[in-house]
Amino acid sequence: MLPENLCDFPFTVLINFTNNKIETLKNFSCVKKLAFLDLSHNRIKNICKSFFHGLPLPWNVNLSFNHISFLEPGTFNDETLSLNNLDVSHNSILVLDISNLLLSKTFCNISYADNKITSFTNKAEKPIKYEDKFSDVGFLDLSFNNIQSIPNFEELNFGKGYGFLGKVVFNRFIFQVISNPIVCDCFLEEMLWNIRNVRHTFKTDSDFLGYTCSYPVNLQNVSIVKSFVYNNTFDELVCKLPKCPRQCKCVFQSSQLRIIIDCTEIFNENVLPTFNYTDMVQSVKGHSKLSETTVHLLLSGRQIEILDKRNYFLNLSYLDLSNNKVETIKESTFLELSRVPNIKLNFTGNHGVLKLPKGLQLLNPNSVILNNVTIACDCELISWFMQWLNSREIDLKRLGVTCKVNSYFIPMQNVTDSDLLCNQDQNQNFSLVFVIGGFLIFLVIIFFVYSKYGHYYFLFRKCLSKSKQYSNFKYDVYISIDEENDEVLRYVGTKFLPMIENLNLKTFMLARDSEVGGVMEECMIESMRMSRTYLFFLTSTVLTKYESVFVREWKHAWNNFISNNKHDIFFINFDLLRLKDLNDKNMKACMIFGKSVNFSDFDFEDKVRKSL
């Protein structure tokens, strides 16, 4: 531990406690003139912010070759400190807070070399902010650590952070990162692309600073500055995507805004691969260019025979099916692809005979490469396919498309109507259309006549086959009146019913004969079913009541009448209504066919007896 009487020497300038067994520290602020402090080669594990608080002079600190694993955020960025050189190398720091790296006051050298640093934080009491003022110059040594990539600025609360990175570079901080396992991938491309306008600041010898790739293997020892920054070419900086379709390789090439799914080597299915796009890009979801990215699916030279839609089509921009065996293309496939802007399909050299659906017309002909393919041709395909190509002035001869007609293979530009038997088919089609058209017209006429005059047909049929079978019915006559019309109710009760009963006819009236407390509608239906003739008293009062008992009785009576030849209908025109007074066309038909008698007729009673 440190000497107890350290504060008795406030004007001490240099303290050298190297090669001891010191494990803990205390505040050094009582040594006001301290400028050099060497605590290297000890056993210190933790460094707290309070240890060095209040030392105003430019000073040098050596904490190398200890066991430091914890360095409190903001320890060396205190506003009371003036730091010149800091050496914290050869320790065990795993996570480094940037407040101990990017200081607000000018310094010369800070070294965290030979630690175990893998990531960075920004968790000081006063976290580093974009608008903070930084030192004008400084050399930062992070060599021999485990840093694989630049810090995630979003996680450090700098947004995408490239403005912050530009500010750091502008302040001429020099970072040395020798022997770190730097991965040169799409995230490095993202950073380099965003700082490309300040690349002149990288004039320092990049190899000396360790700006070289360790991974992937194909970029090992490649200089980041010389190969990428100065040349401004980033196509080799890609991210491998682990959740890739089986037998394929997937990379995110952010420089070209595309995800390449390469299935050209061992993919042996006869349909398109399936994958979940969201799951596949999970590992790069934080990349700023992902939202602009589309998928390039490469299947050249495989065995694809069927092209049907997939749920990733909306993310697709290029589908390479050249030199495959595609024959069947679902109509829904082109319907789905037509929703994708700037889609490009390549069928060059397809070995199968393509059966093209009409949905192909939804795509731009310039977006579909059909060089040296064979198509199953018929009259219909030739008509729309040629128009589709001509819409973009595409030279059919240069395409080299071949038509398969029956068992013959003919260059499409040489195919004639006689080869396809188009005239014969057309004549047959005209004949078929004529027959079908005539039949449809006939059906329309029949439907019109039936809908307008069908009720007359039923009445005419009833008149021809009228047959009274008294023994089959419980009631001979079912009488329906407007029960709210006192005049007709009085007449029926005092005169009409006695006349009918003198003829030994059994009658039923709902108001008189229905059971007390019973369901009226059920009683009405059952009684009508057991009645031979339905007798209706027509009065002017029934014309304005659309939901009355009389109207419901009439609907049931008409349905029974047209469906069963045993029932009959008769009207007594009590108020001498004219045909034009009636709104119901079925009632009108009954009146026209003589199934009624006027109450004023001289021989009224005789006509009623004959009808019942």
Image: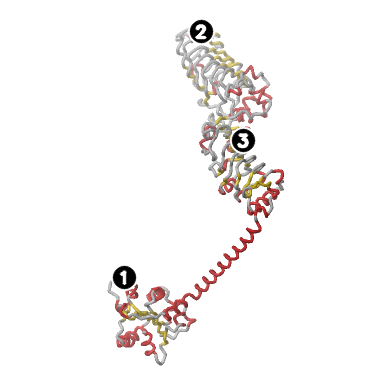
Residue receiving disc 1: 519
Amino acid type indicated by mark 1: Val
Amino acid type indicated by mark 2: Thr
Q: Are marks 3 and 1 in contact (CB under 8 Å)?
A: no
Observer able to see residue 583: no
| Front disc: 2 or 3 | 3
Residue ID at (53%, 27%):
127
Label 1 – label 2 distance at C-alpha: 111 Å
Residue 124 higher or lower than 274, as above or below: above
Q: Position of residue 146 (x, y in %)?
A: 53, 20
Residue receiving disc 2: 18
Closer-to-camera residue (313/94): 313
Q: Which mark is residue 257?
A: 3
Residue 279 higher or lower than 440, as above or below: above
Label 3 – label 1 distance at C-alpha: 77 Å
Secondary structure at badge 1 equals loop
Local packing at callout 1 (Cα closer than 10 Å; few below 14, some 14-19, many 20+) is: few
Q: How many marks?
A: 3
Amino acid type indicated by mark 3: Leu
Secondary structure at badge 3 equals loop
Q: Upstream in the sequence, badge 1 or badge 2?
A: 2
